[in-house]
Amino acid sequence: MDFQGGLHIRLAMEDSVVRAVSIKSDRLVLASQVFQGKAVAESQEMLPLLFSICSTAQACAGARACEQALGQPASATVERLRDLLVNTETVREHLWRILLDWPAFTGGEPDRAGMMASVAIQRDLQRALCPGDNAFRIGGARCVPNAAALIDIADRLDGLLHRFVFAMPTSRWLALEDEDALTAWAGTRETAAAALIDRVIQLGWHAAGACEAKPLPLLEPSRLNAAMREREFIHRPRWLDACRETSSLTRTASPLLGELGHRYGNGLLVRLVARLTELASLAGQVSPDQSKAAAATVSSGTSNPGIGQAAAARGQLVHAVELMGERIVSYRILAPTQWNFHPQGVAVRALSALGGGPQKVEAQARLLISALDPCVDYEWSLTTAE
């Protein structure tokens, strides 16, 4: 059962301009308090059940937090495997949006065959990376990856992305260096991804929703430790007195994204291309040797509370646990949604930047909300002044 709740997003228009945006949340941001009084092992078993979205990232951040609090760090090898498992979940989550949601914006049908194939790839990768054990077992996982299986899985993933997303090898798509090359690729409309990018280009929506937004930097452990004790920080986080964004756009770079960002800021086209870029990049890392560790995932040393982080599909995820022995005294989780859909955060700023007729604003708003991608259900409305 998922206890995460949802968001209520309201836009008000007057004279073809969005005059007000409000985001209210009934997310149970302290739902993790159900772990209070429970043993560490029990909490780790419950995490994927309590938070069904990005459950791998939740398990990863939770294991790291508990290991730090207990002073039982996992090996560097296990940490690399954990990052790879989280990255593969991110691939699946990106494909969920691209294959199931993006077609609706261009009049297409969801590609359920491609999505089912991606789910099977993630399942098989989990089995191949740590056969006979659980990579998120506190402090003691024994993982010996099945190298032959990983080669096969990497080939399957590349073939899936070639067929359903890029209509070319991912390495070739990543080599697109400028807007002209992107426009030519999108113009083929061979996949739902190409069709959506082409629609945004043809409508001239490249910079729709462009706004000022500061990326979430590396979170300094001691400062984060103190902040995670504060209820207001969990509900409405700010870092160095500023709202922050954490997303594919803030953690992904390429020559193409650099050019698009210079022209269109963090507008709609740039956000969509950032998701595709991260997808292609992560797909090339289905190997413990090729995978890149997520930034600021593990803090060295022992502390109570312990802090664990993971680069989840929608942004940086933070867990903080305080123990007495091996019993949990306090458990708090800070999800990416709290940053990106903060009442003064990037979603509000992006939606506030929209203008035009109600139909145009509605279409752009739907795309922007999808691009920022809250990890919970949401409902939204647009009202216009008489």
Image: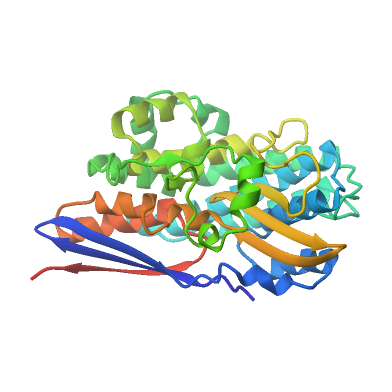
Q: Nearer the viewer, residue 182 or 244?
A: 244
Q: Residue at x 35, y 52 (%)?
A: 368
Looking at the rendered image, the quarter that the C terminus falls into is bottom left
Q: Is residue 35 something that shows in the picture?
A: yes
Relative to 295, residue 378 above or below: below
Q: Residue 184 appears in which quarter of the rendering? A: top left
Image location (x, y in percent) of residue 15: 9, 58
299 sits left or right of 31 in the view: right
Image location (x, y in percent) of residue 261: 36, 31
248 sits left or right of 333 in the view: left
Figure label count:
0
Relative to 243, residue 358 above or below: below
374 sits left or right of 129 in the view: left
Q: Residue at x 26, y 43 (%)?
A: 205
Looking at the rendered image, the quarter that the N terminus falls into is bottom right
Q: Is residue 169 something that shows in the picture?
A: no
Q: Residue 28 appears in which quarter of the rendering? A: bottom right
Q: Nearer the viewer, residue 366 or 191?
A: 366
Q: Residue at x 51, y 61 (%)?
A: 232
